[in-house]
Structures are given as C-alpha cells and as structure tokens.
Amino acid sequence: MDQLDKEILLVLQEKGRITMTELGKEVLLSQPAVTERVRRIEEKGIIDHYRAVVKAEKVNNAVTAFLLFHTKTCEHFVDACSKSNEVVELHRISGQYNFLVKMVSETLHTLETAINEMGTFGDSTTLIVLSSPIENKKIIPILKN
Amino acid sequence: MDQLDKEILLVLQEKGRITMTELGKEVLLSQPAVTERVRRIEEKGIIDHYRAVVKAEKVNNAVTAFLLFHTKTCEHFVDACSKSNEVVELHRISGQYNFLVKMVSETLHTLETAINEMGTFGDSTTLIVLSSPIENKKIIPILKN
DNA sequence: GTTGAAAAAACAGAGGA
DNA sequence: TCCTCTGTTTTTTCAAC
C-alpha cells in the first residue's frame, strides 16, 4: 500500500465506473500500469465489490432508523435480520446493548411493523434518523512501508 | 420505477462496473434498451454515484465504532466531523442523543485520540463494533405503478 | 514502469415492429 | 418502449523497450 495505491483507492471510491485509461490520467500512470495495480488491489481483497449507491428516499424508502438491541440469543437474531429487506446493517457491539441495527423502510408505519416483528428477540431502543449530514465518506488508506 | 428498473438497480448495487451489454443479458433486455433505462435512472438522481467498496480492515483501519453524542451546538460539530478522516458517517437523530457518529480508525489508540478531540462538543457514549454480520446490503426499490 | 499497434469489446445511432 | 443491425469509438491485450 504505497501512495499510488492510496490515490487509486480514493479515486475508485468516488468514481467506481471510471475507465482504466481515465484512472491512469488521474494518478499520472500509464493505462497498463494502473490496470495491473487495480488487479492486484482487487486480488488482495481490499476492494470488496463495486456498487451503485442508491438514494433510498428516491426509491420510496424514506425512513432510516438505528435500533439498539439487547438480545439473549445471537444466531436467531442474525438470521432474522438477514431475511429482512429492511435491515441494511447489523453490528455486534460492546456495552449494555448487543447489537446496532440499521433499518431503511418506506414509512414510519412500515418501520413500526418491522420493529414489532423483531421485538420478540429482546429489548430495543429506536433512534430515528432525521438527516445524515455525512454519508458514504471515503476510507483513507493508511500507508505502510 | 417498474420491475425492470428494480432489477437493474439490484444488479448495479452488486456489480457496479458491469457493462451495459452484460447488464442487458442479466435483465433480459437489449443493450440499447438498458443503456437508456440506466441513463434515465441516473438522470432522476436515484443513483448517487458508483464506488469501490473498500474493506477498512485491509487498509489498516481495524477499529470501527459508533458514538452517541449529546451536543449543545450542531453546526460546529458537523464541521468538525466533516474534517475528520475518521468520521465516515454522521446522523442527526431523535431521542436523548443528538447525533450518531460512525468512526473508522487504525487502532483503539488512534480512536481514543479522535474521540478525545471531539469531547469538547458534549457528552458521548462509545459503542465499539466487535463484528458486522450484515453490511452493504442492497436497498430494495419499492415498485410504484 | 513506458509506448504503440492489433484485437476485442462496448457503445451509440438508425430504422422498424 | 423495445428490438436488431451496423458503424464507430473505446478499451484491453500484448508486444518490445
């Protein structure tokens, strides 16, 4: 992970569909050289995948919420979350709660229904997201040499 | 937003660098037809951008944490978070806390330093992420027609 | 790492169902 | 709105340096 790899990753986090030719121009490298570097970065598993970042509210998913959960069992809860279209993230956390769940739903009403269904797993606290001033910020790779 | 647009968005959330030719095959549409549909989807602003999803732990950012914050002022706090490389998400939330902050840092030590620097803005509770069973799940568009 | 040329592929446009 | 067909552009691959 040198300076060039770092720059490449920063560009790819911003323009995921950029061509190798263009990427080469941005980081001042020839096209075959960047292509090879990107290939190696992908091979190392540094890039999980490429994705279109969808604005949830534009596809009628208007409500985002975080739930703090205190569950007794873990596995069943993870399974249930996996099956829910509304759960988009699930984090195992330290502290008085077990899990932090991110949910995206159509309306407050559909969110309520989804939360109720999960209520059997334990106690929860719901944090409704009013706005998200920062989202999708790039990960800054740390140089190691 | 019909069934085809929905399918296209699901594929693009999984394979952000897919070519229009390949995407056409996946959703059983000709290349010019998908190209046109994607163009319209982008035009509507449904796709925010395309990005490489980087695995933070592979670029030496090993620690993820969520902070619940209770701040007095909002603007200065948002500014400070914007400038921090470690803050990757910031959500304004309802409830007894003002903000939920997602941070990604190199080590527990660097995380601690970053949290300390933000301590001036108010009281906070830190939730260290032990693991993330679900991440980057696709948004399921809701059909309207 | 570079350049440059050949091969492959993807894209854009026209005309028509 | 979609299809097929085709010309053109772009990208990639693969030399040699």
Image (cartoon, coloured by chain):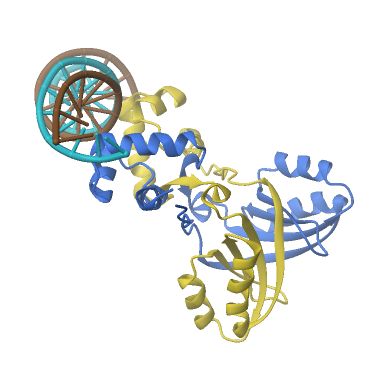
Chain colours: A yellow, B blue, C brown, D cyan
* A104 sits left or right of B114 in the view: left
Residue D16 drawn at (x, y percent) = 14, 19
Quarter location, residue A29: top left
Q: Nearer the viewer, residue B40 or B81?
A: B40
Q: Is residue A1 visible?
A: no
Residue A99, above or below B143: below
Residue A47 drawn at (x, y percent) = 42, 48
Q: Nearer the viewer, residue A48 or D3?
A: D3
Residue B34 drawn at (x, y percent) = 31, 39
Q: Residue at x 50, y 82 (%)?
A: A76
Residue B8 drawn at (x, y percent) = 36, 48
Residue B99, above or below B96: above
Q: Nearer the viewer, residue A74 or B48?
A: B48
Label count reads 0
Q: Is residue B92 visible?
A: yes
* B132 sits left or right of B102 in the view: left
Residue B85, above or below B3: above
